Image: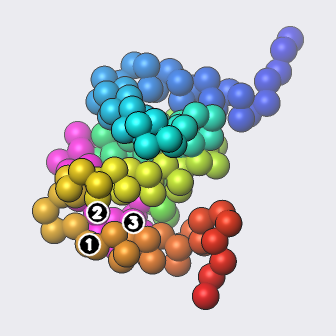
């Protein structure tokens, strides 16, 4: 009998989610392409985090009709404390270490391309809310 580490099982499951869900696969590829054109590699934990972000958003879109490009401070809190943990629990995967960085990358993409959904909060508001609920990004100290 071979047992694998839960992180390895999670990575494999997330690869399967990305391959099988057309919306997740398309958005994942689009954002990775955009990031690579700016010299940002999206692999390992960041890639798995991006899969979770897009899978959670795709589910919210199909179930509740929520636009994956519309972000408010309230939606950030819902994502961090409800949507992401519940999705990961239901799919029996650990929340990838790169999930919060992947969310930031998505916002950077939406800001750079001018595609935030109508009614979205300013990027600074989203970032401040995210920091309040998850901590500052690595390498950045709080003031």
Element on which disc 3 rests:
helix
Q: Does residue 97 lie above or below 135 as drawn?
A: above
Say whether residue 76 is magenta.
yes
* Mark 3 burial class by Cα count in 10 Å: few <14, some 14-19, many 20+: some
Extreme-top residue of the structure: 1
Q: Nearer the viewer, residue 30 or 85?
A: 30
Question: Going 68% across and 27% down the picture, which residue do you hit?
Answer: 9
Query: In terms of sequence position, does the residue under pointer 3 or pointer 2 come before the other?
Result: 2
Residue 2 drawn at (x, y percent): 84, 14
Q: CA distance from mark 2 to mark 1?
A: 6 Å
Counting labels gives 3
Residues shaded magenta: 61-79
Q: Which mark is residue 71?
A: 2
Q: CA distance from mark 3 to mark 1?
A: 10 Å
Q: Which residue is mark 1?
A: 121
Determine contact: label 3, label 2, CB under 8 Å: yes
Q: Which residue is mark 3?
A: 76
* Mark 2 burial class by Cα count in 10 Å: few <14, some 14-19, many 20+: many
Element on which disc 2 rests:
loop
Say whether residue 137 is magenta.
no
Q: Is residue 69 visible?
A: no
Question: Going 53% across and 56% down the picture, which residue do you hit?
Answer: 100
Q: Is residue 67 visible?
A: yes
Query: In terms of sequence position, does the residue under pointer 3 or pointer 1 come before the other?
Result: 3
Q: Does residue 96 lie above or below 25 as drawn?
A: below
Question: Going 43% across and 19% down the picture, which residue do you hit?
Answer: 19
Q: Does residue 142 lie above or below 27 as drawn?
A: below
């Amino acid at each position: 009998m071979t047992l694998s580490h839960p992180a390895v099982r999670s990575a494999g499951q997330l690869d399967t989610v990305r391959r099988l869900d057309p919306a997740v696969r398309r958005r994942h590829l689009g954002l990775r392409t955009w990031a690579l054109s700016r010299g940002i590699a999206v692999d390992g934990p960041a890639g798995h985090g991006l899969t979770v972000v897009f899978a959670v958003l795709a589910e919210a879109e199909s179930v509740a009709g929520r636009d994956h490009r519309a972000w408010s401070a309230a939606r950030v809190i819902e994502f961090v404390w409800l949507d992401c943990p519940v999705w990961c629990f239901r799919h029996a995967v650990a929340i990838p270490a790169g999930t919060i960085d992947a969310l930031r990358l998505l916002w950077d993409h939406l800001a750079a391309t001018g595609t935030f959904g109508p009614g979205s909060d300013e990027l600074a508001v989203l970032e401040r809310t995210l920091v309040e609920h998850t901590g500052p990004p690595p390498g950045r100290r709080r003031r």
